[in-house]
């Protein structure tokens, strides 16, 4: 799943209160409001759906919902992992809802979305990690909204190649999987995940369907060094990743890791230029950028994809 400096690497014990630094001016956002925001909130409640916008306390919820877009969170709202940067609740999830894909597709149709983003919690309790529900959500959305572009932001499925093949075989327009941070910080920030496993998943997805765009995201400000961030960008491009998003980590609550430092808008611009030079087809880089932030605009900026080939 998909984010302020303490001393050293900014480590705090789970449950401990961490002092928060005042945010710079460029990170302040307006409170959510407006007719479109209220409409999406009502629809999410009516269809008994979840969104990562709410679950992860995204700072862009007001802007995105105000513009009529949302990122749907499938497979429930309880994650089996406990990433130290994420506000989504963790624990033992209940049985997943087989009717959820149909409700997501209906919501996308009612919102008349031209571009839909679907993500999930980690479901390590399921043999396929939830790949079947991802594939069904894509299939039913295609039936309800044949012209809608679909982006899925998937977990690592614990490296299950069959699960990845099932999702890729459903033909999303964009398949995203976030590495989130640099390898050195995985034991602290993502103890249930493995950097090389995530990198391998992205490489394999591109090999399965070279016509499908792949995407990943990196949070900055968790304690990484600049050269480590650049090395991750280089690794991602080496894995064939087409799109990259770079954003500032923000401590969702006092229970999560504190921010190590705030990157300036100028630094994000420098990293964007570096990403373009590395060969990414599109780089979205800025303090408030998130993986699905303006995802429709990110996709529209890409060159036309080659024809789809059979999935091996």
Image (cartoon, rainbow, N blue to C red):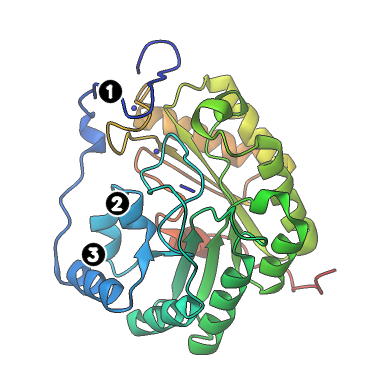
Query: Could you classify mark 2 by the number of other residues whose Cα lies within 10 Å: few (under 14), some (14-19), or many (20 or more)?
Result: some
Horizontal side of residue 301 vs 260, given as left or right: right
Whole-number angstrom distance, CA of label 3 to CA of label 2:
10 Å
Horizontal side of residue 39 vs 118, given as left or right: left
Q: Residue furthest top?
A: 7
Q: Residue at x 57, y 47 (%)?
A: 216
- Up the image or down, 33 lies above or below 244; here it is below
The residue mark sitting in front, 2 or 1, is 1
Q: Residue at x 23, y 57 (%)?
A: 62
Whole-number angstrom distance, CA of label 3 to CA of label 1:
32 Å
* Along the line of sight, the residue nearer the viewer: 202 or 82: 82
Q: In terms of sequence position, does the residue under pointer 3 or pointer 1 come before the other?
A: 1
- Up the image or down, 300 lies above or below 276; here it is below
The quarter of the rendered structure image containing the C terminus is bottom right
Query: Could you classify mark 3 by the number of other residues whose Cα lies within 10 Å: few (under 14), some (14-19), or many (20 or more)?
Result: some
Residue that carries the numbered disc 1 in the rendered image: 18
Q: Can residue 240 be seen in this snapshot? A: no
Q: Residue at x 56, y 46 (%)?
A: 178
Whole-number angstrom distance, CA of label 2 to CA of label 1:
23 Å
Q: In terms of sequence position, does the residue under pointer 3 or pointer 2 come before the other?
A: 2
Q: Which image quarter: residue 274?
A: top right
Q: Residue at x 33, y 78 (%)?
A: 47
Return the x and y of residue 14 as percentages of the image width and height. Answer: 38, 28
Return the x and y of residue 157 as percentages of the image width and height. Answer: 65, 54
Residue that carries the numbered disc 3 in the rendered image: 66
Residue that carries the numbered disc 2 in the rendered image: 60
* Along the line of sight, the residue nearer the viewer: 160 or 115: 160
Return the x and y of residue 88 as percentages of the image width and height. Answer: 38, 48
């Amino acid at each position: 799943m998909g984010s302020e400096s303490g001393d050293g690497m900014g480590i705090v014990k789970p449950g401990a209160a961490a002092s928060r630094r005042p945010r710079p001016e460029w990170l302040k956002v307006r409170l959510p409001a407006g007719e479109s925001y209220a409409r999406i909130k009502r629809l999410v409640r009516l269809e008994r759906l979840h969104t990562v916008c709410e679950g992860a306390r995204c700072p862009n919820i007001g802007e995105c919902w105000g513009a009529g877009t949302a990122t749907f969170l499938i497979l429930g709202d309880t994650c089996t992992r406990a990433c130290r940067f994420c506000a989504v609740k963790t624990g033992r999830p209940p049985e997943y809802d087989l009717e959820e894909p149909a409700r997501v597709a209906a919501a996308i149709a009612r919102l008349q979305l031209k571009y839909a983003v679907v993500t999930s919690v980690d479901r390590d309790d399921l043999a396929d990690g939830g790949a079947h529900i991802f594939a069904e959500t894509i299939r039913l959305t295609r039936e309800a909204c044949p012209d809608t572009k679909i982006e899925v932001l998937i977990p690592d499925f614990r490296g299950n190649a069959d699960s990845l093949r099932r999702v890729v075989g459903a033909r999303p327009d964009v398949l995203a999987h976030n590495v989130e941070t640099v390898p050195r910080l995985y034991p602290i920030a993502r103890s249930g995940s493995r950097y090389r496993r995530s990198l391998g998943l992205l490489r394999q997805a591109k090999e399965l369907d070279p016509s499908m765009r792949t995407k990943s995201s990196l949070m900055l400000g968790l304690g990484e060094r600049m050269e480590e961030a650049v090395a991750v960008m280089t690794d991602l491009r080496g894995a064939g990743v087409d799109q990259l998003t770079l954003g500032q980590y923000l401590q969702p609550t006092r229970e999560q890791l504190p921010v190590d430092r705030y990157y300036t808008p100028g630094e994000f611009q420098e990293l964007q230029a570096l990403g373009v030079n590395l060969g990414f087809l599109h780089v979205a880089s800025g303090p408030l950028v998130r993986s699905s932030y303006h995802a429709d605009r990110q996709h529209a900026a890409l060159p036309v994809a080659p024809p789809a080939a059979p999935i091996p």
